[in-house]
Image (cartoon, grey):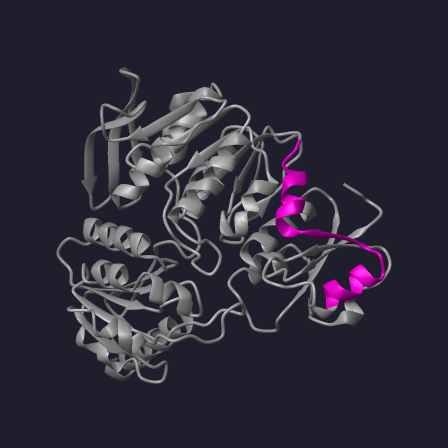
């Protein structure tokens, strides 16, 4: 690190960027950043840390800066362009991540789904046991003196995770996503194979994934899951309305009982991965047990609140596999309630590529509502609409506008899940305002 420079983050409100800025700030570096004026959920942590936030403007760029460029922005962005013209040192986010993990026992959490939840769980557990730096894809980041571990989310998009070479890798699954970049599922698998080749000590992979089973590596690969073919196996699983408990065995050796206050089968797998990493780093299993019990989740992953008798769940799910997992978790926690889903399709390319799978997963809810498709900065239009998806949904499929959330008022003492990776929260806020207003009128 260079203590004589100011690290300027272009796009500092991005989830990974915000987390990285917080790590550098905690390490005593001078940090600032620029972004859009619109409030985002990552902003509060940056403000609390006292990190200067600026609106985008090429005048922000001057001598004495080291620029970290968010991957959402091209080299034509005025700030990035000016920084390069001035000859300033410019790193892309993933390149700089590869630098700051060095010198610690690094654990990269990868996979098409489950990265953020697993990274958050692992960071929580290890932080309670040893000094741990962590970078989580919900905007949470922390740097501590003399950290033993560095836990980070390793994103496969555009093969960005290949800028890092971790000691350990957790691989939660391989699935086809990001159709704007990857050509096929084989293309995705090749990226994970390269990541496996770059891992230094060991890989922990979900045993039910056939493509993860095909990986080859110079380091040991340990599989986790529910079956006898898995190295780390969860047995005697009990899923209740307070969480999930299970015994863990490693190649037949009983490691004892564990409990997590989380819902959905996927969180059992996430917990197994955490136990496996800790086991190979000689972390006391009783301490792991204790830390697992106190995990409260990460931002925008099954985040719950209750208003006017309704349970509202906010979730980042934007892929059919994630939607299925989130509904499964809600069924576990609320087995006797109706579950409605408000889903915002995320990008035109993903919607058209996975249309039938979206409909199949969404139909697991009791009723489905859709919003218009969220167009990302990379993709402003397409040849598909939410109406096309609606035609394939058998459990409703009405399309909501942010100005009229009243169809949701048919539910009382039930569960509404707002799902999406775009600006779905504006629909959620509109519904919450409606509920609050009605409650005041009733009272």
Q: Give the quarter of the image for residue 80.
A: bottom right
Residues in magenta, as a range: 79-102
Where residue 186 appears, as percent x and y from the top left, is 40, 45
Where residue 163 appears, as percent x and y from the top left, is 61, 42
Q: Return the residue nearer the eye: 433 or 157.
A: 157
Q: Give the quarter of the image for residue 291.
A: top left
Q: Is residue 158 magenta?
A: no
Where residue 396 appears, as percent x and y from the top left, is 18, 73
Dividing the image into 4 quarters, which one contains the C terminus? Answer: bottom left
Q: Classify residue 113 as left or right of residue 123.
A: left
Residue 80 visible at all: yes
Q: Classify residue 235 as left or right of residue 300.
A: left
Considering the whole magenta stretch, tell me its main secondary structure: helix
Where residue 442 appears, as percent x and y from the top left, is 24, 81
Q: Where 13 sits versus 397, above or below?
A: above
Q: Return the residue nearer the eye: 47 or 403.
A: 403
Residue 23 visible at all: no
Q: Where 295 sits versus 139, above or below?
A: above
Instruction: Name the residue rendered at 45%, 43% in the picture.
Output: 120
Dividing the image into 4 quarters, which one contains the N terminus? Answer: top right
Instruction: Name the residue rendered at 64%, 54% in the picture.
Output: 49
Instruction: Name the residue rendered at 16%, 68% in the picture.
Output: 395
């Amino acid at each position: 690190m260079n203590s004589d420079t100011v690290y300027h983050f272009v796009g500092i409100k991005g989830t990974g960027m915000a987390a990285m800025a917080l790590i550098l700030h905690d390490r005593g570096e001078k940090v600032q950043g620029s972004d859009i004026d619109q409030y985002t959920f990552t902003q509060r942590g940056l403000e609390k840390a006292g990190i200067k936030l600026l609106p985008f403007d090429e005048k922000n760029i001057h001598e004495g800066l080291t620029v970290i460029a968010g991957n959402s922005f091209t080299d034509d962005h005025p700030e990035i362009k000016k920084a390069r013209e001035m000859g300033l040192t410019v790193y892309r986010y993933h390149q700089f991540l590869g630098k700051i993990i060095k010198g610690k026992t690094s654990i990269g959490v990868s996979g098409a789904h489950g990265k953020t939840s697993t990274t958050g769980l692992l960071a929580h557990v290890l932080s309670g046991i040893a000094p741990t730096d962590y970078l989580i894809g919900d905007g949470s980041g922390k740097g501590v003196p003399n950290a033993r571990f560095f836990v980070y989310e390793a994103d496969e998009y555009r093969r960005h995770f290949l800028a890092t070479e971790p000691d350990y890798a957790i691989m939660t699954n391989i699935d086809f996503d990001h159709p704007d970049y990857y050509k096929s599922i084989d293309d995705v698998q090749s990226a994970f194979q390269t990541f496996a080749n770059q891992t230094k000590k060991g890989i922990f992979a979900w045993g039910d994934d056939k493509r993860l089973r095909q990986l080859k590596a110079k380091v040991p690969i340990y599989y986790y899951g529910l079956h006898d073919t898995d190295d780390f196996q969860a047995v005697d699983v009990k899923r209740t309305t307070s969480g999930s408990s299970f015994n863990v065995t490693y190649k037949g050796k009983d490691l004892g009982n564990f409990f997590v206050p989380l819902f959905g089968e996927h969180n059992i797998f996430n917990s197994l991965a955490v136990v496996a990493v800790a086991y190979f780093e000689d972390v006391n299993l009783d301490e792991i047990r204790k830390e697992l019990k106190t995990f409260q989740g990460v931002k925008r992953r099954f985040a719950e609140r209750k208003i006017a008798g309704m349970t509202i769940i906010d979730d980042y799910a934007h892929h059919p596999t994630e939607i299925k997992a989130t509904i499964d978790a809600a069924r576990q926690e609320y087995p006797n309630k109706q579950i409605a889903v408000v889903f915002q399709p995320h990008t035109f390319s993903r919607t058209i590529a996975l249309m039938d799978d979206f409909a199949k997963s969404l139909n697991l809810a009791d009723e489905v509502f859709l919003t218009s498709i969220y167009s990302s900065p990379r993709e402003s239009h397409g040849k598909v609409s939410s109406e096309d998806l609606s035609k394939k949904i058998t459990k409703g499929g009405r399309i909501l506008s942010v100005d009229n959330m009243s169809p949701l008022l048919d539910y009382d003492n039930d569960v509404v899940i707002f799902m999406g990776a775009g600006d779905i929260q504006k629909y959620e806020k509109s519904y919450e305002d409606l509920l609050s207003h009605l409650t005041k009128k009733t009272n």
